[in-house]
Image (spheres, rainbow, N blue to C red):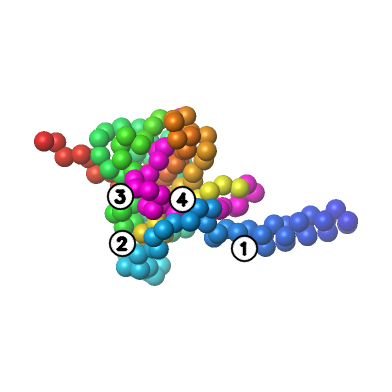
Amino acid sequence: MKLTLITFASLILLSCSSQTTTNSPTKSTPKVMDTNYNKTDAEWKKTLTEEQYYVLREKGTDRPFTGKYTMTFEKGIYKCAGCGYELFKDDQKFESHCGWPSFDSEIGNGDRIKKIKDVSLGMARTEIVCARCGSHLGHIFDDGPTKTGMRYCVNSTSIDFEPEKKK
């Protein structure tokens, strides 16, 4: 009985702490989200596919090694699938063997992607969302093999790719 009460109290405390810290940024972002993309759920459902809505708005995840951009290494720009905001360049992408497209940095000076503490699933991670429209992109980890040491682990469903125009 005592063990049950301790477990129950721990779960309550854990859920309370996740509610208060989940939306607190781990890094300040200089730009506020663009209010043109402050859409209702119904508006998002009209513009996104079911899969995009699940990943971008409900914080879903692609199954590993199934995303269309996991093994894409062409020249071009990766944009938010929700609003078209340019997020990553092809030279920021690397093969991480983790099952999702991985990037070691983002376009700009840290103002394209908002970082949010995520304590869901019983672990502490940093969620990444588009700074313009708030769409869920994936998570960022500090275990990347490149000189930045970062690994932006992104769902293919969260991004669109615009190939570089041939001259």
CA gap between label 3 and label 4 equals 14 Å
User: Which residue is disc 1 drawn over?
Assistant: 20
Mark 2 is surrounded, within 10 Å at the Cα level, by few (under 14), some (14 to 19) or many (20 or more) other residues, namely few
Dot 2: what SS? helix
In x, y percent, where is residue 138? 46, 47
User: Which residue is disc 3 drawn over?
Assistant: 86
In front of the other: 130 or 31? 31
Q: Earlier in the sequence, mark 1 or mark 2?
A: 1
In x, y percent, where is residue 143? 52, 34
Position of 148 relative to 87 (above/below): above
Callout 1–callout 2 Cβ contact below 8 Å: no
Q: Nearer the viewer, mark 2 or mark 3?
A: 3
User: Which residue is disc 4 drawn over?
Assistant: 128
Q: Amino acid at mark 2?
A: Thr
- For the C terminus, the image quarter is top left
Q: Amino acid at mark 1?
A: Thr
In x, y percent, where is residue 130? 39, 54
Residue interval drawn in magenta: 97-123
Mark 1 is surrounded, within 10 Å at the Cα level, by few (under 14), some (14 to 19) or many (20 or more) other residues, namely few
Q: Residue at position x 40%, y 41% from top? A: 105
Q: Earlier in the sequence, mark 3 or mark 4?
A: 3
Q: Amino acid at mark 3?
A: Glu
Q: Is residue 55 visible?
A: no
User: Which residue is disc 2 drawn over?
Assistant: 47
Q: Earlier in the sequence, mark 4 or mark 1?
A: 1
CA gap between label 1 and label 2 equals 31 Å
